[in-house]
Structure formats: C-alpha cells, structure tokens
Image (cartoon, rainbow, N blue to C red):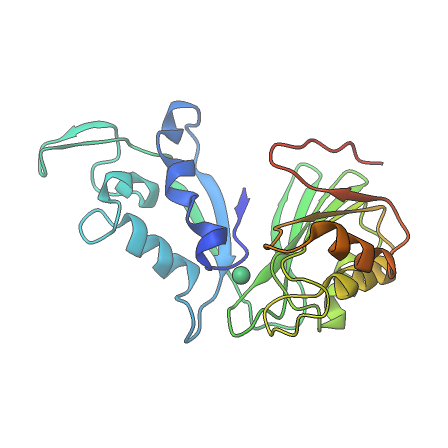
Amino acid sequence: MVGISHLHPDHVSDLPAFLWLSHEVRKEPLKIFGPTGNDAAPDFATFLNRLFDEKSGAFPVLGSALGDSYGGGGVRPDIGRVVAGGVRLDVGVIDAAKAEPSLVFQREGTTVTAQRIPHGNMPTLAYRVQTGNVSVVFSSDQNGTDPKFVEFAKGANVLIMHLAVAPGTDVPLHATPAIVGRIAQEAGVGQLIVSHFGLFNLDAAVADLRKFYSGPLIVGADMQCTPVQ
Ligand SMILES: [Zn+2]
C-alpha cells in the first residue's frame, strides 16, 4: 500500500511519476490512502481525480489508475494518443479530523494505522506500520503540539521524523529540533531517523535535538537502508 500524509507539493508531486508504467511490474490494484480535505486542500480522492481523470485530469494518460473506460496500454482510439495503462488504484480516504487513530490496512500479519497530526491548517496523517513484532512510525510534517502523537509512536522500533526548521524557529507547520527530540524521548522509540532537512546548519540542529533525546539516532539520506534493532 501507499500512505500519503498530506497534499503539500513536496509530499505528493512524485506520485504520477511513481505510478507511470507501473503496470509493467504490477497487475493487481494498488491500495493507496490519503487524508480528508478542508479549505486548504481537497480530499485525497478528489485530488486523484484532478490528476488522473481520463477527460479532465492533468495526466489523462494515467486514467487507468482510476479505472478509466479504456484500461489497457497502447493507442486509445477515442483520443488517438498512447496511454500507459498504469496500475489501477484502490483508493481510501482517511478521516484527518478524527482525534483517535484509524485502522487503514490489515493483511497477513501487517497492520497500518493512521493518526491526525497538527500541520498548520493542512489535513495531515502520520502512519504506523506494524509487521510481526516490528513497528515503524512515519511522523510526516507536523509541529509536534499534539501529545496524541507521542502515544501513537509509543515504543516503535523506528520513528522517522522530519527536521524541517532550525533551532528556535517559531512556525505553525514544523517542530523544532528540540521538539522532535522530546517526542522521540517521550515515545521511548528504539531509534530515531531524521529526514526532510531545511536549509539550515544540520549539525547545530542535531546538537539541539540531542539535548532532549538520548537514544540511537540516524541522519537519513536518500536510498538509505536501516536495519531494525
Ligand atoms: Zn507539509
């Protein structure tokens, strides 16, 4: 499954490229989830329609993602254009206004839950993946002011959190390094991976985080693989 946290461009604009030609390696529908909408963003199903609708979408060549009337790859006779026949999506919209976690996905020993998190006025979800006795929590963008997220991340083997602003920055969208460190410490996670760095002195930010978090810490990088401890 794919879990979308929110509709800020830096979190979702790669989706069409990710799906493009995916039918060549996948035949069954792909479960994909995202948040409900509000004044700041459409709900996730509407967002996908605006992207992939076979007539009015930004990428009609990916209309098959929504199960268009054509379905396969090749030249569509009605529009005279080549379409890729990308994998069909099985879309779920998760209530991003609900205080308690939602069950998103459950299959063969893997459970995924989602929790609303505060990120300005943008409906935003964190995800927790539990598989066997290993759990990984994806914080996404958040300002770290909701104690329910600490509960949600409690005891996770791995917590991945965004480090988007410099120490001492006061913004409604993002948690400072100190808050990221405090959340990881209070949640008692096995290890913290930080990612999503802004343009600031990373060493200084990590030093600030370290004042509040004493556990294992990894500074994330693209394509990095991390053994779960
Ligand atoms: Zn964001």
Q: Can you say which quadrant of the picture contains the C terminus? A: top right
* Residue 40 rendering spot, x and y as whole percentages: 43, 72
Question: Depth check: 163 or 95 in front?
Answer: 163
The residue depicted at 27 percent of the width and 31 percent of the height is 84
Q: Is residue 64 above or below residue 35?
A: above
Left-right relation of 69 to 46: left
Q: Quadrant of the N terminus?
A: top right
The image quarter in which residue 144 lies: bottom right
Return the residue nearer the eye: 31 or 57: 57
| Residue 168: quarter of image | bottom right
In the rendered image, the vertical position of residue 159 relative to residue 24, given as above or below: below
Q: Left or right: 54 with respect to 209?
A: left
Residue depicted at x 21% and y 46%: 54
- From the viewer's perspective, tell me whether residue 170 is left or right of residue 55: right
User: Residue 133, how many percent across, how many down?
Assistant: 81, 40
Residue at image x 82%, y 63%? Answer: 182
How many badges with numbers are in the image? 0
Q: Is residue 155 left or right of residue 221?
A: right
Give how far across and how far down residue 207 sits, in percent. Answer: 82, 55
Q: Nearer the viewer, residue 142 or 137?
A: 142
Which residue is nearer to you in this view: 159 or 97? 159
Q: Position of residue 130 (x, y in %)?
A: 73, 45
Residue extending furthest right? 214
Residue at the (34%, 41%) spot, across then down = 65
